[in-house]
Amino acid sequence: MKRIFLVIVLLPLLVCGEPPTLLNEQQDTEKQEGGDIGQGLPLTSEGRSPFVKLAKQLTPAVVSVEAEQTIQVRSPMDDFFEDPFNDWFFKQLPPSFRQPKQQKREAKRPILGSGIIVSEDGYVLTNNHVVERASKIIVKMIDEKEYTAKVIGTDPATDVALLKIDKNGLKYARLGDSDKMEAGDWVMAIGNPFHLVGTVTVGVISAKGRTGISTPEGSPQFQNFIQTDAAINPGNSGGPLVNLSGEVIGINTAIQTAGLPGNIGIGFAIPSNMAKKVMDDLIQYKEVKRGWLGVQYGNLTPDLAEAYGLEKQKGVLVSKVMEDSPAKKAGIQSEDVILAWDGKEVDYATFPTTVAQTPIGKTVSVKIWHNKEIKYVEIEVTKRPAEIGASEERWFGMTVSSVMSEEAKKLGVNEREGAVVIEVESGSSADLAGITAGDLIKKVGNKEILKLSDYELAYKEYKDSKKPVVFKLERGDRIIIVALKKE
């Protein structure tokens, strides 16, 4: 796992309901009443840690996930030909004089992660980044037995993947209710860090609802991470975070290291409730169905809250309402402030996940601040449009994706409108015209491109055109207009 992360000192805590007692108070109690001052420790009747039993029960359900990824290896000449000046210079020459770009070589890269068996017939939960672009996936049990795994589905937006092995009668782990967990609850992580199979680490939940977590593989779009100080290291990705009842309440995903090579006390796990919804959707629908409101929104700063007449800095500020969206139909307007969703207060960080996890078709009561008055509207949640993938068609040698996609994020695209070029085939019409990955397509022919579906409609209209098709693109502050003709 190539992951992340930060520092927390693990303090001894009591799991009993009474508040911890200071040492001098314990001594006074012992003098007055007698007894063993260790009676309050969380030990079993045999004097063992409760984690011993959990480890024995759950370790057989934790597997190693060994994936083989195909990657592109750069040629030493790539840096020369990809220099902006040289790239421009060679494009000025006639095609017969141009030096062809160096072809990248393919290489195999092994990836090691963890996974958790969640059904007796072989379903395995892990991270998407463990199996992404894998040509072969092997699941290895604690007893060294190996099985070839099939990918049932992946969800880069949450970094969850669901695998299946052809085996019945397996020991499996139960998924618990992550919403019931609180900061301070004991947890145990199990996985295979640095190829050390069946490693168990213990800590507490440090916080819930963490967002804005960046990873080397790209930040998941929907984040609601559980933070823990149970030691998580490379290789733990996809393994379980479990509670004292032996239930999986998280899928270990990332760490923060502050530049150091290993764990420093801050790890992150995908909540089990989020992972379960993804798993159920992938099994039932072969895709993840998410709720959609249809607004663009921003953070409500203290100054904005004061300017809009709000007493507290609570809620999210609506900046734009999309046409034909549930929000538009309900009468929500730009500059409204959404205060509560389905009876629960909302904030900027967690609002997208809250909406996305709302069942499609459910009618939700939304509390808003409209023209300095509280107003309630009823919204029927619809399915989120499929705007996080790439266009299935390669046109003029270009692969194009949504500006909301993971590919766009990796290219540093922060725009909300348009479609982004994520790959250009060497020697294609787009390549010869100077189009490069990261360019934003804003207009094709006479069609404005606000989202990926607009681009796909333009493709259908112009794909058979015998005349050149005009593309208007943005590259930083530059506007680029080119005409591409079918070869």
Image (spheres, helix red, strand yellow):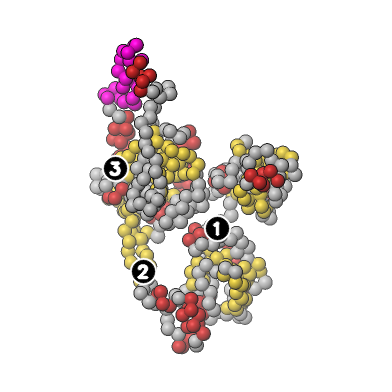
Mark on residue 199?
3
Give yes or no for residue 33 being in the magenta stretch. Answer: yes
Residue 403, located in which quarter of the rendered image? bottom right
Q: Quick one: SS at disc 1?
A: loop
Residue 363 at least partly seen: no
Within-10-Å neighbours for mark 1: few <14, some 14–19, many 20+:
many
What residue range appears in magenta? 29-47
Q: Does the residue at mark 2 contact the one at mark 1 (Cβ under 8 Å)?
A: no
CA separation in Å, label 2 and label 3? 33 Å
CA separation in Å, label 1 and label 3? 37 Å
> Does residue 203 lie above or below 232 as drawn?
above
Q: Main secondary structure of the magenta part?
A: loop
Q: Residue at x 30, y 29 (%)?
A: 49
Q: Which percent across, then down, holds residue 191?
A: 32, 44
| Amino acid on which the number 3 mark rests in the picture | Thr
Q: Residue at x 55, y 46 (%)?
A: 349
Within-10-Å neighbours for mark 2: few <14, some 14–19, many 20+:
few
| Amino acid on which the number 1 mark rests in the picture | Met
Report which residue position mark 2 lands on. 73
Q: Which percent across, then down, holds residue 164?
A: 37, 49
Q: First in sequence: mark 1 or mark 3?
A: 3
| Amino acid on which the number 2 mark rests in the picture | Val
Q: Quick one: SS at disc 3?
A: strand
Q: First in sequence: mark 2 or mark 1?
A: 2
Q: First in sequence: mark 2 or mark 3?
A: 2
Q: Which percent across, then down, holds residue 24?
A: 36, 20
Report which residue position mark 1 lands on. 404
CA separation in Å, label 2 and label 1? 27 Å
